[in-house]
DNA sequence: TTGTAGGCGTTATCAG
DNA sequence: CTGATAACGCCTACAA
């Protein structure tokens, strides 16, 4: 029942026989303190189990040593089993740990949640804000940037706000994949596109459309929302509308996985009858039947890169306005 | 360039022509303020864009309105694609959102990380601490509890600390699964067990061992660490040591998934030659080949339940020392 | 019902 | 190199 008041600077100071100021200096690593005194202070800190009160500290320093990671998705979708969000979280956590800062996770799925996030972040309760994936034209990133609060987005903000961002090379990856399909002799190449209110959905579709168009091939499209269920529906639609489809590029591995299964149920062999390529390279991709050929995006690295940019901005250093991480075609057996 | 100092209570008070105390009352929803004054204050708050400084507030209230979720796993494993950790995060986030508290995520994989977590949490920088999954005998939960800091673990702490926890009914679920296998006429039932330094690994193994023993059947075991790679190795070992195995219970869906593939490569048909049952019911389970029969654990609910318990403890209410969430056998085609 | 005043635990500015 | 002392922004008795 050690309900004992936690010790304060004052207590440590008394015990070490010095002033609060000196203790503060030692605790914060100032070098201008005599060695003998430093030792005395450290011993007192040790004996008392002193831990600085961050609230008090940030009250005066105006820093909070914490960063918010905002996930604007509905709570139910953020953690489906694509590994995108967990990957970003992990990358951010790693980088923040190295910087000795805290990661505050915020879900902004509901309107109430969004408002909460706005209150919290504009209230300067964090040193910076990371946006994990924007849906539609969220004005929040731009607003925060204008308030002078460090912000970094994953993907170009759709509302055109002048906010620094990091993204993976969707278009490049997709272009490579579609060309690969064409080289294999595929001519009726369809796509299961992602949501068109998210950069990832838009750019992956653009990459597909431009590449098939450049090759003089038709555009065959059905839309999904990155989930397996939507992939199943889209694949069925594609099959119904274009029975002669001979390749499918799905904008997410989850949708590609669903397409694989739907194709099998429809009696199509993969890749003989229809080739399938996904996007993400989630762990499951290597275990599908057949193993999925897909475009790998460095998702953990995305989280890390965003965080590094944010920390630079917070430190007043200049950063590239946009950073692009490269993607890579991983050929397995589905195409 | 609105670098303008953010407004303080003082500023709002001046603008509304009242005292700081009154503004504080209005902001915190005190009812003892005249309606007309409330309106004036609210207008001033609005006009100035006032947002309370949490650091200042928690300095005096001794509350931080934030809760830490500690994931003691190595960063690289926390977000593999089993949905356990993301599920817990999601449940906690939902419940915390309702309580208007912040979720601070902390990875304690490395020794340095663990020490960081210890400093932060013992330093009373959060109102409570949630432990997402314990590895070995971590003394931290017990230590925090002794310091009077609200703590809730997922799973019984292995060091015997007297800390409240919430867990799913591993043993019950596994028992049902093994009995089901026996009813189907399986007699050479093996298990791919999880790590034996985690409650989940231990209890799932216990459930298996006791049930096969009670039926007079042999114990055939290989160990994994919940990942697919380890599942592959374990299944190979099982096949080598017990070529006549006719059923496998894997302690995680990921390992079960790997087992499915390994069995196929070995020329075994599932479920005809070998039945396979997993544990978790991750989304992928419905999409494996064949679809996986597995034991479902309510993982998001686990996160929510832990959080609710923590909030109760923090509010000084009494809580059950242990809470058990039920599991359920989901029969698909692999068994 | 409203205002006054003190203090929460640190850091930072100055003297000494 | 060290020690007073004044903020930092807010809440909360207590007084009016």
Image: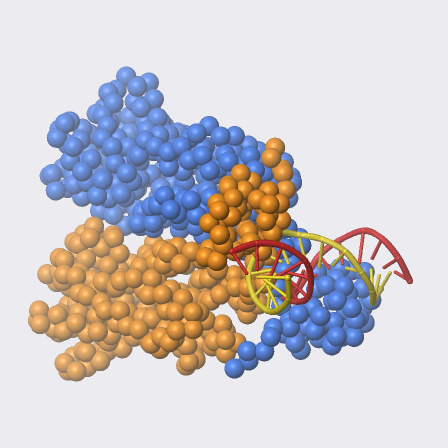
Chain colours: A orange, B blue, C yellow, D red
Front residue of A188 and A334: A334
Front residue of A292 and B316: B316
Q: Please report the residue visible at 38 percent of the width from the left and 40 percent of the height from the top.
A: B296
Q: In this view, does A272 lie to the left or right of A93?
A: left
Q: Can residue A68 be seen in this view?
A: yes
**Residue B192 appears in which quarter of the rendering?**
top left
Q: Where is residue B13 in the image (x, y as percent from the top left)?
A: 74, 71
Q: Is residue A220 left or right of residue A63?
A: left
Image quarter hosting the N terminus of chain A: top right
**Residue C16 appears in which quarter of the rendering?**
bottom right
Front residue of A219 and A249: A249
Q: In this view, does A267 lie to the left or right of B95?
A: left
Q: Position of residue A14 (x, y in %)?
A: 62, 45
Q: Please report the residue visible at 25 percent of the width from the left and 52 percent of the height from the top.
A: A284
Q: Please report the residue visible at 51 percent of the width from the left and 36 percent of the height from the top.
A: B143
Q: Position of residue A164 (x, y in %)?
A: 38, 75
Labels in figure, total: 0
Asked if B270 appears above or below A106 in the picture, the reply is above
Q: Position of residue B286 (x, y in %)?
A: 30, 48
Image quarter hosting the C terminus of chain A: bottom left
Asked if B125 appears above or below A67 in the picture, the reply is above
Q: Can residue B311 be seen in this view?
A: no
Q: Please report the residue visible at 54 percent of the width from the left and 36 percent of the height from the top.
A: B145
């Amino acid at each position: 029942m050690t309900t004992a008041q936690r010790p304060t600077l004052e207590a440590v100071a008394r015990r070490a026989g010095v002033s609060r100021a000196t203790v503060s200096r030692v605790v914060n690593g100032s070098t201008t303190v005599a060695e003998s005194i430093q030792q005395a202070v450290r011993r007192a800190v040790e004996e008392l189990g002193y831990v600085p009160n961050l609230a008090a500290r940030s009250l005066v320093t105006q820093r909070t040593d914490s960063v918010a990671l905002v996930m604007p998705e509905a709570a139910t979708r953020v953690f489906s089993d694509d590994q995108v969000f967990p990957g970003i979280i992990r990358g951010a956590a790693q980088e923040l740990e190295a910087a000795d800062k805290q990661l505050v996770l915020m879900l902004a799925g509901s309107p109430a949640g969004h408002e909460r996030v706005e209150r919290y972040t504009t209230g300067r309760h964090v040193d910076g804000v990371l946006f994990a994936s924007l849906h539609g034209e969220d004005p929040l990133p731009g607003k925060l940037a204008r308030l002078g609060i460090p912000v970094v987005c994953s993907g170009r903000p759709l509302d055109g706000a002048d906010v620094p961002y990091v993204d993976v090379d969707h278009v490049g990856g997709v272009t490579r994949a579609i060309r690969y399909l064409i080289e294999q002799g595929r001519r009726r190449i369809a796509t299961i596109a992602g949501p068109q209110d998210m950069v990832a959905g838009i750019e992956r579709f653009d990459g597909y459309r431009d590449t098939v168009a450049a090759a003089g091939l038709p555009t065959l499209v059905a839309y999904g929302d990155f989930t397996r269920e939507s992939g199943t529906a889209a694949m069925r639609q594609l099959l119904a509308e274009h029975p002669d489809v001979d390749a499918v590029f799905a904008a997410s591995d989850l949708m590609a996985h669903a397409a694989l299964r739907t194709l099998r149920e429809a009696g199509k062999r993969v890749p003989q009858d229809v080739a399938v390529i996904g996007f993400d390279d989630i762990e499951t991709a290597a275990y599908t039947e057949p193993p999925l050929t897909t475009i790998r995006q460095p998702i953990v690295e995305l989280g890390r890169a965003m965080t590094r940019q944010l920390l630079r901005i917070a430190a007043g250093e200049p950063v590239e306005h946009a950073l692009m991480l490269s993607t890579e075609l991983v050929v397995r057996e589905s195409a």
